[in-house]
Amino acid sequence: MTSASVTLTVNGETQTCPPQTSLPQFLTLIGMNPRLVAVEYNGEILHRQFWEQTLIQEGDRLEVVTIVGGG
């Protein structure tokens, strides 16, 4: 039996998304540009090369930080 949505925590807040959502798709769903953020996935910095193959799972914990340019 599959759930209609996956529940996870993003920056301390509960979020949901459809099953089989990739990390870049999820970031876009919550209004973030995947090119402008860094992601900590379940306590570890997730390198960008793994984002496309990373599917959001029930209970995941994400910390999403916007990268700010300038000086």
Image (cartoon, helix red, strand yellow):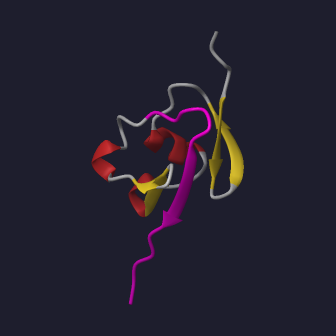
* Residue 27 spot, x, y in % from top left: 52, 47
The secondary structure that dominates the magenta segment is loop
Task: Identify the residue at horizontal 65%, vertical 48% (top origin).
Answer: 9
Q: Residue furthest bottom?
A: 71
- Seen from the viewer's position, the closer of residues 42 and 38 is 42
* Residue 20 spot, x, y in % from top left: 50, 26
Task: Identify the residue at horizontal 57%, vertical 41% (top origin).
Answer: 60
Does 42 appear above or below 11? Answer: above
Magenta residues (range): 55-71
Q: Which residue lies furthest to the front in this view?
A: 43
Q: Which residue lies furthest to the right in this view?
A: 14
Task: Identify the residue at horizontal 35%, vertical 34% (top origin).
Answer: 53
* Residue 47 spot, x, y in % from top left: 32, 53
Left or right: 56 with respect to 4? left
Q: Residue furthest top?
A: 1
Left or right: 25 with respect to 10? left
Q: Does the magenta stretch include residue 16?
A: no
Task: Identify the residue at horizontal 39%, vertical 84% (top origin).
Answer: 70
Left or right: 18 with respect to 66? right
Which quarter of the picture shows residue 7? top right
Which quarter of the picture shows residue 4? top right
Q: Is residue 57 magenta?
A: yes
Please state the total of marks drawn on the protein image. Answer: 0
Instruction: Classify the position of the C terminus by image quarter.
Output: bottom left
Instruction: Classify the position of the N terminus by image quarter.
Output: top right
